[in-house]
Image: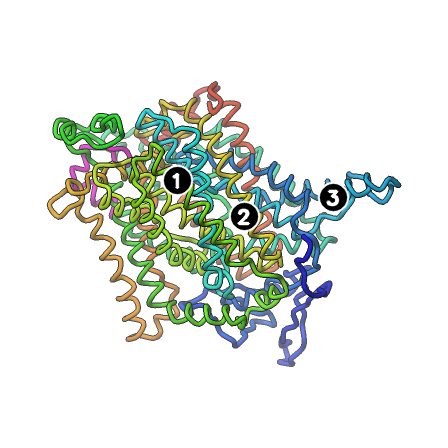
Amino acid sequence: MAGEIEEPLSREIIVDVESKDKNGTVTEKSIDSGDNTAESPVIAANDEGGFQGDDKEEYVKGHPVIRNGLDVSKFLISTRDDGDPSFTFRSIVLGTIFTALSSVITMLYVFKPVQVQVSATFLQLLVFVFGEAWAYLTPNPDRFKVNWVRKTLKFMNFGQSFGIKEHVVASLIASSGNNGLAGVEVYAIERLYYDRSIAASTAVLATFSISLCGFVLAGVLKSLIVYPAEMVYWSTLPQVVLFQNLHFDRKANKKRLEKFGYALGFAAVWELFPAYIVPWAGGLSIFCLASMGAPAKTRSVFGKVFGGASSNEGMGILNFSLDWQYIQSQYLSFPLKQQVNTWIGYVIWYPAMLGLYYSNIWKAKDFPFMSTSLFAANGSTFSTTSILNEHGIINETKLEEVGLPYLTSSTVWGYFTQNLALGALIAHVILFYAKDSIIAWKQARSQKLPDPHYQAMLKYKEVPMWWYIVSFILAFVAGIIVTAKGETTLPVWGYIISLLLGAFIAPFSCILYGLYGTGVSTEQISKMVAGAVHPGRPLAGLYFTTWSHQVILLAVNLANWLKVGQYTKVPHRVMFGTQVYASLLGAALNYVIMNVIVTNQREILLDPVGNAVWSGSTLQSTNSQAITWAIAKKMYSLNANYYIVPIGLVIGLFFPIIHWGLNRVFPRLKKLPINTAIIATYAGANYYGNTSWVWSSIAVGIFSQVYLRRRLPGVYNKYNYLIGAALDGGSQIVIFILSFAALGASGSSHPFPTWWGNPTGNADHCT
């Protein structure tokens, strides 16, 4: 875009660092931007050091140890900026095309036993392949003598090299399939559980409003949640490394892409087996196989403890999945400090789930071991519409006649841990990061942040604040129209409260995500507040949560991409325009795909258990929360069955306080990368759906972050992220094809014949 660059840029910036040879002699070494693997940096677990990191550099055998975000900026990510164009015709076209693919896959997984996202690195590599083809297979404009032809071909980027910045822009657009997802999920819930369809005008305005509110917040808070060096957004780091490797080291591309192609082909062929031909490969359990001839009661217990290949089957202890669609490459990229906390959470999760069920807490044995549905007192599925009037509001007379709904013990535990995690998140950020947050904010405002990537971006014009203000006004007015004229049952003042709640929580979520690459669920607090301010209105609660939760979700997602833009030197104003377009495009395509799936798979999505292919668990959970919080006084008050759930928020606040106090008394504990918010999250995150992947993810994490990263850093840096992206891509392409060709997403189902590896019951042969 014209006017983006205000001063000339050097073609290459090389970071020089000191290193010592085996004799202790200090020498100068370069980490060239073209190949970050030359020095084989070792990434070490970070402690609770906050945003600022440690200025003292550390080396092991001549290699810089990447301990924190400042080390990442200095040694792992190049500051090179070639000044190449970013917002091009080619980047927009490629991004738009691949958004369709990502939207379809994203929505497919909303209706599957485990909800996962499309691999961003896979989309990134697909865009690269097609971008390179665009450059090499199109004619050079200079060959044409006619001026208007030459200008047209140049505008269409014919014969021009595919640069890193337009690659980033196209990949950002392509990954927007997850934007606006919360709003589309509510539309699906209305169709499934309320027998009503939202008007087209309401859907358009609501989607526009929901998609932009979170975007505005991310832009306003970027000085805190993007610019500081410690805001690494670790789960996106593989993308940045891959962007630079692909564009700054062209000679190595052929060999890398060959390995990528082999891995993708292998994953595609293999995925046919666990997903279609041999579902048993999605849940290998010695205990399940050993129990096949046991009495029914024994098999039932084994299924709850060791089963996990089917939706809501069991906890999947020592059950290993070979189905990569559920494992995914995120466990190849999450830092070790994050994964250690998740493992601690699992240690809590197993005994808690079993203890609650077999102690018959909350009448647990009267209902399924795992399910997110609501149940009547007699154990049958609770009908949502049986207690609602024609406007979607609770009818107290009907409620008295039908009786209160019940939750499974696993669901109550899931809700409770969500509140624990949120309380812990708020307290943890305040206690451990408040001081550094204030320093980082002041440094960013004065343009004195020490991060070299931040300094390198100062040459580009910032996005004026009035751009964000205008965007917010448009989104806000659209939301006002929807709540005032639409069928949401959410009043305007409730809509305003939802935005304020989302704006309050979003900075905490962004900070945790930036530091650890993961976050905590925020839907529960939104449902709680919605129930308090709109009692008896579950639909209002759903829309309240959509705005507040989507503000948080998009703030995290877009802050994540702003960090990618900072690392790859995409101008601020280009990122603004691209993110607005991507957010609206992704939400619109999600809405179209949702309609297709809900129409064709309605019956199985309404089933409280589902099967190994389709499951309405995610939407059931969201709706169950909305219904129960709409009658919060009867469900969650001190005299009600589930009073422990809201108290979890208060209890969670004390975990970081205790942690902080112990660190003060025993300073050595600071070396342990403990984060109670993440522990609480994973102590209940898998309270529904498929669980056979959990132990496989642990194995993948140990292999990648403990063995490869520490023992074979050269292999880790060159191939860890690349092969992970290929495995994601191969599996997701096959799932996309199978879903519509054989698994019924298009309406026609063609299941594989039943045999031992594809049993009629649970795939792992438990129960």
Res 290 seen here: no
Please provide percent x and percent y for residue 699: 45, 49
**Image quadrant of residue 460?**
bottom right
Residue 600 to residue 625: above or below: above
Residue 622 included in the magenta stretch of the image? no
Q: Amino acid at mark 3?
A: Phe
- Which numbered dot is residue 155? 3
Mark-to-mark CA distance, 2 and 3: 22 Å
Which sits earlier in the primary sequence, circle 3 or circle 1? 3
Mark-to-mark CA distance, 3 and 1: 50 Å
Q: Which mark's residue is nearer the viewer, 2 or 1?
A: 2
Q: Amino acid at mark 2?
A: Gln
Mark-to-mark CA distance, 2 and 1: 36 Å
Number of numbered discs: 3
Q: Amino acid at mark 1?
A: Ser
What is the quadrant of the C terminus in the image? top left
Label 2 SS:
helix
Residue at the disc numbered 1? 692
Res 274 seen here: yes
Question: In this rendering, would 425 be left or right of 714?
Answer: left
Range of magenta residues? 352-374
Please provide percent x and percent y for residue 748: 48, 18
Which sits earlier in the primary sequence, circle 2 or circle 3? 3
Question: In this rendering, would 167 be left or right of 406?
Answer: right
Question: In this rendering, would 615 be left or right of 650?
Answer: right
Residue at image point 65% right, 81% down: 25
Residue 559 to residue 320: above or below: below
- Which numbered dot is residue 579? 2
- Residue placed most toward the observer, 309 or 98: 98
